[in-house]
Image (cartoon, grey):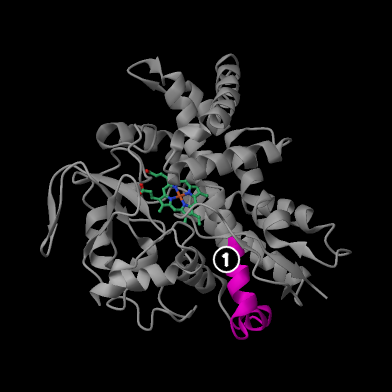
Amino acid sequence: MDKIIKKLDLMSNEELHDPSISANKLLNGERAFFYDLYDPPFYILSRYDDINKALRDPDTFLEGYGNGPNFISSNGIVSDGDHHTFIRRIVQPNFLMGSIRNLETRLEEITDDLLSDINDREVWDIHDDLSFPLPVIIICEILGIPTDDIKKFKGWADAAVAQMCSEEPETFEKELDKMNDYFLLLINKKRSIPEDESLISKIANSKINDKYLADDEAVLLIKQIFVAGNETTTSLISNLVWRMLSIDNLWEDFVNDRLEIDGLISESLRYDPPLLGLFKTTSRDVTYDNVTIPSNTKVMMHYGAANRDSEIFDNPNKFDSTRDGKKVISFSVGIHICLGRELAKLETRVALRALRKKFPNLKLINNGQRVGPFLFWGRSKLPVSHN
Ligand code: HEM
């Protein structure tokens, strides 16, 4: 068994293209696995119970030095204690169920619009034509950012997720500075006019002890919301369409209304988590069996493994949309539980309903391409046809 575990290589071609292989290796290895193929090395937790407990213990497992493997000074909503509570309170109301439900009609309009010119095309792409633009447009509308330069946003969002996973994060700084400048301009504009309904206006006008949020923190918060909500939701939509078109009769059963949409979504999140894992920083030594993770160490919470832990999920390597999805951990749990989870699910529901209605004969051309960064799991290309 040890021999198999030694071969764990998250960046290998094989594991990048099938993260269930890493999950399986981890679940058969030590509870706290020391991964030294990355600089700096880190630990990985994989058992559902260990991760669930760790995420509910934010005093020990801090946001600390950011959600990636590198030690990067972190702030905005990726923060701890009172600061995190304060920041989360500013933005949370915009993502509560009540506010999200109001977006359904608008999401349907955007989706119809995106799919309106597809009919005549023999081959098109789920990622490029639907699952990438839909989340970007809606998050821009929530924030109050003009959507006219969507390609520029795509470049920045890609740079931000690549930076999070890279051993050389500084290489992305130049590109990301452009994003910072763009958001700062918007903040200053919002501060010069009366507060409006957009989230940027709210962030721009929020105050700690009677002072506006510092410029760099306001910029960071907008960036975090913008980035967190895009690539992940894009991947949820494309991963689910990919599986439905590749596994048995899933698509046909869905088209014929034999499968519940919400069951499909939660099973997709379990089986193909858009974020395979995120990192915390330990504030003290923590011991799992005979392995002690030292204080001030990066620890990856491997959601992909936890979601396939057979102690919790029967027959975990089977895609089964009828299973109870309550324990799926892909949106995290505890005080940092994903703020945008209801929005992501609603976007996916709307996209799937529209695809089913317009293109019941949808077919996969091939498996497309995997997104680049190792922590993320989704399709950056997914070509389909519909005749
Ligand atoms: C399928 C889509 C999504 C997945 C899989 C996902 C996943 C996650 C996860 C795992 C976390 C926990 C981070 C941690 O423990 O530190 C998180 C936090 C967060 N997510 Fe999402 N997310 C998704 C969509 C969205 C959307 C649409 C938004 C829109 C705004 C969003 C905004 C956030 C924010 C702001 C946080 C930080 C919350 C905090 O630290 O208090 N996410 N997300």
- Give the quarter of the image for residue 142: top right
* Region in magenta: 237-258
Drawn side of residue 60 relative to residue 249, left or right:
left
- Residue found at x 59% / y 55%: 234
- Give the quarter of the image for residue 190: top right
Q: Is residue 240 magenta?
A: yes
Q: Position of residue 227 (x, y in %)?
A: 52, 42
Against 282, residue 185 (above or below) is above
Numbered disc total = 1
Drawn side of residue 197 relative to residue 317, left or right:
right
Quarter containing the N terminus: bottom left
Q: Position of residue 299 (x, y in %)?
A: 27, 51
Q: Main secondary structure of the magenta part?
A: helix
Near mark 1 (Cα within 10 A), the count class, few <14, some 14-19 or many ≥20, is many
Q: Position of residue 33 (x, y in %)?
A: 24, 61
- Residue found at x 48% / y 55%: 376
Local secondary structure at mark 1: helix
- Give the quarter of the image for residue 124: bottom right
Q: Position of residue 253 (x, y in %)?
A: 63, 83
Q: Is residue 369 magenta?
A: no
Q: Is residue 363 visible?
A: yes
Drawn side of residue 122 relative to residue 114, left or right:
right
Q: Is residue 308 visible?
A: no
Task: Identify which residue, 265 or 241, lies in the foreground.
Answer: 241
- Residue corresponding to mark 1: 239
Against 291, residue 182 (above or below) is above
Residue type for callout 1: Asn
Q: Residue furthest right?
A: 120
Quarter containing the C terminus: bottom right
